[in-house]
Image (spheres, rainbow, N blue to C red):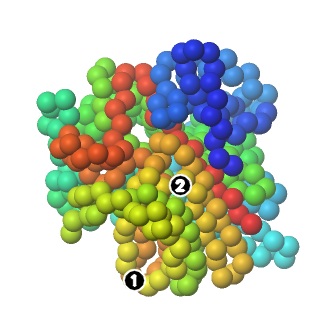
Amino acid sequence: MRPNFFDIGQTHYWTAVKFDISNPPHVNKPAGIRSQGWKRMRKETAHIARAASFDEPHVPASVCNLAAGAMHAAVRPHDGGRLASLWREAPGNRRTDVLVPLTAGSFDPLVWPKAGTYPLAPYSNRIRNAAFRFSETLVQLASHPATAPHSLHGFCQQRPWSVTAQTATQIEMRYRHEPAHAPDAWPWAFEAIQRIMLDPTGLIHEIGVESRADTPMPMGLGIHPYFAVSIGDRFQFKADAIWEADADGCGRRLRAFANNERLHDLRHGAMETTIYYAGWSGTASLHRQDGTTIVMETAAPLDHLVVHAPSGGAYLCLEPVSHVADAFNLAPAGLPETGMRVLHPGETLWASVRITVT
C-alpha cells in the first residue's frame, strides 16, 4: 500500500501511511521531516494507542514474537533493534522465510550476521574517511573495521533498543543517543524510533529519527533487509539514475538512465554486486522460484535503493535509503541529488516500508 498524501490546515503537510484502530496514526511532511506539530499529533492520538492495549514502556525481552494469521515475525530489541526473522506458516508447519532468519545467539555488534533487517541511522552506507564538514565544523567519526578508514551504516544497529509499546501484532522500539556517551559515533543528540506492524499479508516497518540537538544536523536513514533467495530468482524495479561508485564503495558521479533503461528486470546470481540507484519508483518485486512473491513499497524520503548480493548469492539486499553512500561529503562539494537531509532542533525524519507476501 503506497502512502496517500493529504493536507491538514495551512501549516503542516503530512503523510498517512496506513490507518486502523490498532495502529496509532503518525504524520509526516511530504519530504519526511516533521516538526513540533508531530509531538502535538502524538498527544492527540494517545487515546487510540490506549484503545489498542499498548503496554507501558518496559524492559525489552531478548526476543519479541509477533503473529497475524499465517505471518510471523521475531524482533530482537537488544541486538540493534533488529527484525530477526519474517516468515509465513502454512498447514503442516511448513515455513516460508521471507528474510534470512537470524539464528545466531550473541554476536559482535561490529560483525553482525547477514540476516533479518536492521535500522540504518543516522546515515546509511559509507562516509569517506569517517569524516565530513558540516556548517564549518569538521566531524570525525569512528571507522568500521570492515571498511576502514571509512565509517559504515551508522551505529544504531550496534546498540540495544528499548521496547516502548507492544501488542500481539505490533511493536515500537526506541534508541536514545547522547553524544557525551559516544562522541566518536555522532556529535548530535537524537532519538531513533522503529515501529513494526504485522498483518496477515505482510508488515509495515517504520523508522524515524527525532533531533534532540540544539543545532541543525545532517541526517539519513533506511532499512537493511536480507531477503531469502535462490540463484535465478527474479526481481524488478524502476529507477531514474545510478550513482557510479569508486573502489571504496563511495558515490562518485550520478548518471541518468534513458527512458528505455529505467526498468530493471534482474536475476539473482552468484556474483558479488553492489549498485546505488537514485530516483527509484518506490516499488520492488521479488519473484522466487518457490512460487513466493514479495513486494516492497515505500516513498520519500527513501528515494535511493541499494542492491547488494554477496559472492555465492546467499542473500539479496534491497535497501531503501534516503541518500547515496558518502552523501555528507558529496552534497557540500556541490553534487546534486545526493539525498542528504538537514534536521533542525525538534524535527523528525520519518519513513515507512511496506512488505507484502503472496
Mark 1 burial class by Cα count in 10 Å: few <14, some 14-19, many 20+: few
Q: Residues at badges 2 and 1 in contact (C-beta under 8 Å)?
A: no
Q: Amino acid at mark 1?
A: Met
Q: Which mark is residue 271?
A: 1
Q: Residue furthest right?
A: 91
Q: Residue furthest front?
A: 259
**In the displayed structure, would residue 265 be above or below residue 249?**
below
Residue 54, visible in the rendered structure: yes
Q: Amino acid at mark 2?
A: Ser
The one nearer the camera, 356 or 101, is 356
Can you give x and y, in whole percent of width and height, for residue 275 in the image? 37, 67
Q: Quadrant of the C terminus?
A: bottom right
Query: CA separation, marks 2 and 1?
Result: 25 Å
Earlier sequence position, callout 2 versus callout 1: 1
- Residue in view at x 44 percent, y 85 percent: 270
User: Which image quadrant for residue 221?
Assistant: top left
**In the displayed structure, would residue 119 be above or below residue 162?**
below
Mark 2 against mark 1, which lies toward the viewer? Answer: 2
Residue 43, visible in the rendered structure: no
The one nearer the camera, 349 or 92, is 349
Can you give x and y, in whole percent of width and height, for residue 324 in the image? 34, 53
User: Which image quadrant for residue 247?
Assistant: bottom left
Q: Which mark is residue 178?
A: none
The one nearer the camera, 240 or 79, is 240
- Residue in view at x 75 percent, y 58 percent: 201
Residue denoted by label 2: 281
Can you give x and y, in whole percent of width and height, for residue 203 in the image? 67, 52
